[in-house]
Amino acid sequence: MSLEAAATSARGGFACMFSSSEEFEMALISERRAQGRYDQRRTRWPAIMFVGCAVIVAGTALLLG
């Protein structure tokens, strides 16, 4: 009897507090948003890279044309 009681209490320690994976994922995302992990940081790199590539293409076209 003591062994069965110990096994039952050990299984109870592994119980999950979420009823589904969707509930777990929502709690995880909410926690990460609260930590600030999903902040949108605006960078200028895409615009700078576009202008740089456009200048290179225009320069190549002028040299070869």
Image: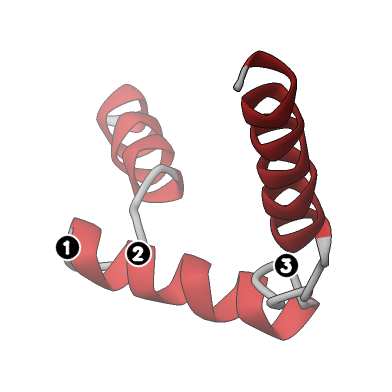
- Decide which of tag 3 and tag 2 comes sooner along the chain: 2
- Mark-to-mark CA distance, 3 and 1: 24 Å
At 42% across and 36% down in the image, what residue appears? 10
Give residue 20's quadrant in the image.
Answer: bottom left
Q: Position of residue 61 (x, y in %)?
A: 62, 28
Q: Are marks 1 and 2 in contact (CB under 8 Å)?
A: yes
Residue 12's x, y, as percent? Answer: 36, 49
Nearer to us in this view, 32 or 18: 32
| Element class at badge 2 | helix
- Residue 42, image quadrant: bottom right
49 sits left or right of 20 in the view: right
Please tell me which residue lies in front, 63 or 39.
63
How far across and down, in percent of the image, does residue 4 sit?
25, 29
Q: Are marks 3 and 2 in contact (CB under 8 Å)?
A: no
What's the residue at 36%, 74% (across, down)? 26
Instruction: Tell me the amino acid under the disc marked 2.
Output: Phe
The circle on residue 20 is 1
**Residue at which label 2 appears:** 24
Local secondary structure at mark 3:
loop
Q: Which residue is mark 3?
A: 37
Q: Residues within 10 Å of mark 2 (few under 14, many from 20)?
A: some
Q: Quadrant of the C terminus?
A: top right
Q: Is residue 51 above or below residue 60?
A: below
Instruction: Count numbered badges in the picture.
Output: 3
